[in-house]
Every structure is written in structure tokens, then in C-alpha cells.
């Protein structure tokens, strides 16, 4: 069970690092000034990345890519 929790935590951590790398300094300053926009973006990006990762994992299991 702990491996599943660690895997999910690492996926969210990687998603946050990728999102931070894609935003410029000016964009990041504008987004961080409004906490409501920041919370909505973080939620949306987190949901999108987690869905994409789980879909890719499901495809890997189905087509036996994970072996």
C-alpha cells in the first residue's frame, strides 16, 4: 500500500515541477498574486496530469508494455 501512495505522490510532485518550468517569471508573478486563480490552475493541472499518467499506465498494462 505504501508503494501506491509513494507512486501517486511522485507523480504529483513531477507534475508540479514540470508546470513550474513551463511558466515564465512574469506569468508566475501574475498567477501567484491571486490565490483563487492559483488554486484553480493547480487543481486543473493536477487532475489533468494524474488522469494522463493513469491512462498511460492502464494502456501499458493492457498492451503489456510494462514488462
Image (tube, rainbow, N blue to C red):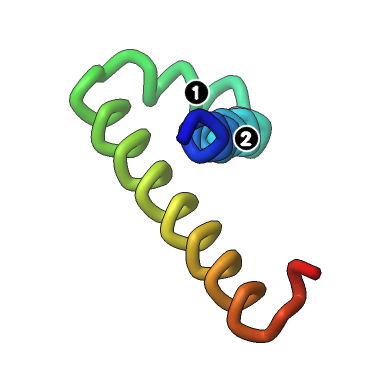
Q: Position of residue 50 (x, y in %)?
A: 45, 51
Image point 74% across, 68% down: which residue?
66
How many residues crowd around disc 2 within 10 Å: few (fewer than 14), some, or many (20 or more)? few
Which residue is labeled 2 in the image? 14
How many residues crowd around disc 1 within 10 Å: few (fewer than 14), some, or many (20 or more)? few
Is 8 in front, or is 42? 8
Residue 19 visible in the snapshot: no
Residue 35 visible in the snapshot: yes
Image point 33% across, 38% down: which residue?
41
Image point 49% across, 23% down: which residue?
28
Q: Is residue 40 left or right of residue 3?
A: left
Q: Position of residue 17 (x, y in %)?
A: 62, 29
Q: State how far apart marks 2 and 1 are (Cα).
A: 18 Å
Which residue is labeled 1 in the image? 28
Q: Is residue 62 left or right of residue 49?
A: right
Q: Position of residue 34 (x, y in %)?
A: 25, 19
Q: Secondary structure at mark 1?
A: helix
Q: Secondary structure at mark 2?
A: helix
Is 64 in front, or is 45? 64
Amino acid at each position: 500500500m505504501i508503494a501506491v501512495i509513494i507512486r501517486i505522490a511522485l507523480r504529483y510532485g513531477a507534475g508540479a515541477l514540470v508546470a513550474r518550468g513551463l511558466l515564465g517569471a512574469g506569468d508566475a508573478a501574475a498567477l501567484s498574486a491571486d490565490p483563487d486563480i492559483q488554486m484553480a490552475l493547480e487543481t486543473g493541472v493536477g487532475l489533468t496530469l494524474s488522469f494522463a499518467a493513469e491512462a498511460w499506465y492502464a494502456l501499458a498494462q493492457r498492451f503489456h508494455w510494462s514488462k
